[in-house]
Structure formats: C-alpha cells, structure tokens
Image (cartoon, coloured by chain):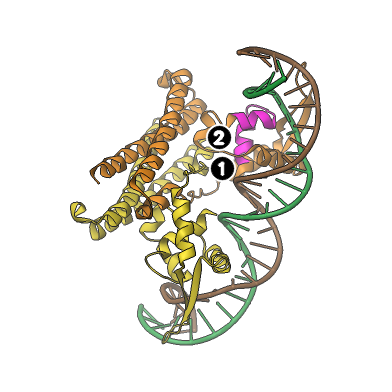
Chain colours: A orange, B yellow, C brown, D green
Amino acid sequence: MSLSYALLALLIDCPSSGYELNKAFETSVGCFWKASHQQIYRELGKLEDSGWVKAESIPQQGKPDKKVYTVTELGRQALTDWTAQPCNISPVKEEILVKLFVGNLVEREVLQTHIETHRRRYEERLALYRMFETKGFADVHSLSVDDHFRYLTLRCGIQDATSWIAWCDEVLDYLATL
Amino acid sequence: MSLSYALLALLIDCPSSGYELNKAFETSVGCFWKASHQQIYRELGKLEDSGWVKAESIPQQGKPDKKVYTVTELGRQALTDWTAQPCNISPVKEEILVKLFVGNLVEREVLQTHIETHRRRYEERLALYRMFETKGFADVHSLSVDDHFRYLTLRCGIQDATSWIAWCDEVLDYLATL
DNA sequence: TAGTACATGTAACAGGTTACATGATTGA
DNA sequence: TCAATCATGTAACCTGTTACATGTACTA
C-alpha cells in the first residue's frame, strides 16, 4: 500500500498527471521511491476508486489530454493517519552482494566490472543529487520547515550514494590485490 | 527470480533446510537479503521442480524431520551464469523518507519518535554486524578469498547502518531547533 | 502451563515487472 | 524520415505479505 501514500505525498501540494508523477521519480523524489508507469496508472485508478484523489481531464494544445489528479479531503486524512503510524524499515535485497558472496564462481574481471558499473551508477546518481542540492537548497538556513524536510530526504540520498561509492572503492582495492 | 539465486548462494557450500535458510537471513546474510519463511518454502519447491536443488528428508531425534536441500550441478551452473550477468541496482523505497517529506502533516513529536525508532533499529543492526565482524573476521589479512568476499558483504551492511545513523542524527538535530 | 524453538506448509491477496498497444507532435 | 517526448493504458505473470494450520520438545 505504500506506493499509494508515496503518490499522495507528491500530489498533496502539487496536483499532477500520471506521466508527471513518473517523471518526478526520476528527479530528487527518486531518493525515496521509484515505480514503473504501469504501476502508477493502476494505483491512481485505485486511489480514485477509493475517493482519495479526484481526476480532471485537461485538454492541451499540440499534446494529448492529461488527467490531473488532486488529493481530496479524505485522501489528505488517510495520508495524515498513515504518516502518524509506526514506520517500517525497508527490507534489504542487494543483488550485487549476492554476486559478491559467490564471487569465486566467476572470473575476477567479471566481478570487477560489476563493481565498477555499480560505482558509476551511484556516481551519476550523486551528481544529480548534488545538482538538486545546489539548485534547490542553496541557502539551507533560509528554508521553510517544509522545504527543510525535503532537503533532508535529499541528504539521505546523498549519504547513501556516498556510502556505496566508498564501499565500491573498498572492494576494488581488494580485487586489485588478487 | 533473485530470491532463487540468493537461496542457491546460501546452499552452494552449505546444504540446509528451509528453516535454517530462514535463520540465516536473520544473521550476517541479513545484510544482503531477507525473505519470509513462506516465500522460502515456496521458492525451494520451485527450485526442486526445475532440478536446481535436490531434497533429502533427515529424521532427527526429539525434533521434527527436516528437508535438507543440496544444489545440483544444473543449479550450480545456473547460479554461475546468473552471477556473470549484468547486475541490477535495487530500487529505492523508503517509507520513512515519504513520511518526512510530508512531515508537516503531523506533530513534531511523532516525527521525532519515527526517527528515533529508526535510529535504534539501525543501532541494533550495527551492533549485530560488529559482533559478526569481531567473531568471524578478526584477522582480515589471513582470510581466504571466499571469506574475504563474505567479509566485504558484511562491510557493506556496516557502512549502510552507519550512514543511516548519521542521517538520523542530522534529522534529530534539525528537529531539536524547531 | 505458558512460551519459545523446532519444523513445514497452504490459500488468498497485494505489489511489482514485462510485454504489448496506441497515437500525436517536435526536432535532428 | 527517424527518434524522442508527451500521454495513457491492458494483460499476463511473478514476487512478496498476511493469515491460517499443525504438531513436538524443552525451559521457565
């Protein structure tokens, strides 16, 4: 059910279409959630059925119509209730660690390529997050409480990416000694 | 399909029962995977159907029989092939960051409790990992390659937990200023 | 005698992925 | 004219969770 709440969280102060929500997951929101467009459209349908959001078709010029979703009072209450409830820790599922765990099954070079690719992806992610930090949160002390909360979610993404890069380096250093 | 490979990875040099695999996910293996017992039993059934593992019923005294699974040559090959294939980055889904994102909907104290609980959980996890580090990998330089790979997966868990704790402190510091 | 550890499962449902499907506009 | 962007969806399938179900042995 968490995807519903992630969508409500994005919609609550910015009514958007499914397409725009999907785009959002590719920006700074990507530090805390990611979903495929199919999943988003399905979930928006369910949210509409339960009366948590309402949709409005907006005609556009030169582009197809878009369905813009707005959170209803019912949806706002549901999101508030959910936010107040105890929080679940997210389960760990790291493919790369499974591969490293059985690393002896493959050539060193294969393992090294995996780690290098992994490192590069986190480097890219970090560069993106750093850009959002510079562009959106330049003066941290002048941020509103709301914006500061959002800034802290970005900080989490930055820390996570930084930590992965450091770990990749630790592994690459070891692989270099073999 | 990744759970199958995580199970094969655990079974490949230590034939185990479903119950034991489930226990393993609560120890150092927990830094890279976690699954419910229902999922494990179902997946073991599938693995047996596809001939990647074979099961043997072991009678025990004073305890119920256990079904011990061993990886077949076919399973070993499948795991090796999978390990050599490009690695997927795991999707981010962090409930706590969604809650922080809409933190203004709830009382400060609620938010603070969420973060404190989160911090405590990672503290506990870190303490566990540190114990595994001390007990299992005391002298890093004398480890076999295989063991060193496993040590590096544990290092990843340690870095992750450390990074989360630091982030929680950053959030708590901010909350204290409000 | 109540709880925990041992041990394995089924059934129903929810969440997520992959493949397929359509169609306009804009820029290289 | 080819690819990318905008825009929304369906269908089939696989993965993961929750609730239910059973039974022994040991320990507090």
Tell me the chief SS of the magenta region: helix
Q: How many marks?
A: 2
Instruction: Assess disc 1: are there few (<14), some (14-19) or many (≥20) residues with their C-alpha within 10 Å of its C-alpha.
Output: many
Q: Which mark is residue A9?
A: none
| Kind of residue at disc 1 | Thr
- Which of the 4 image quarters holds residue B80? bottom left
In the depicted view, which residue is nearer to us: B146 or A105? A105
Q: CA distance from mark 2 to mark 1?
A: 8 Å
Q: Which SS class for mark 2?
A: loop
Q: Which mark is residue B102?
A: 2
Q: Decide: marks 2, 1 in contact (CB < 8 A)?
A: yes
The chain letter under disc 2 is: B
Which quarter of the rendered picture does the N terminus of chain B lie within? bottom right
User: Does the magenta-highlighted stretch encompass residue A18?
Assistant: yes
Which quarter of the rendered picture does the C terminus of chain B lie within? top left
Q: Position of residue A29 (x, y in %)?
A: 54, 32
Which span is picked out in magenta?
Answer: A5-23
Q: Is residue A165 visible?
A: yes
Q: Position of residue D21 (x, y in %)?
A: 63, 77
**Circle 1 residue:** A83
Q: Is residue B171 shown above or below B34?
A: above
| Kind of residue at disc 2 | Val
In the depicted view, which residue is nearer to us: A70 or B77? B77
Q: Position of residue B81 (x, y in %)?
A: 47, 53
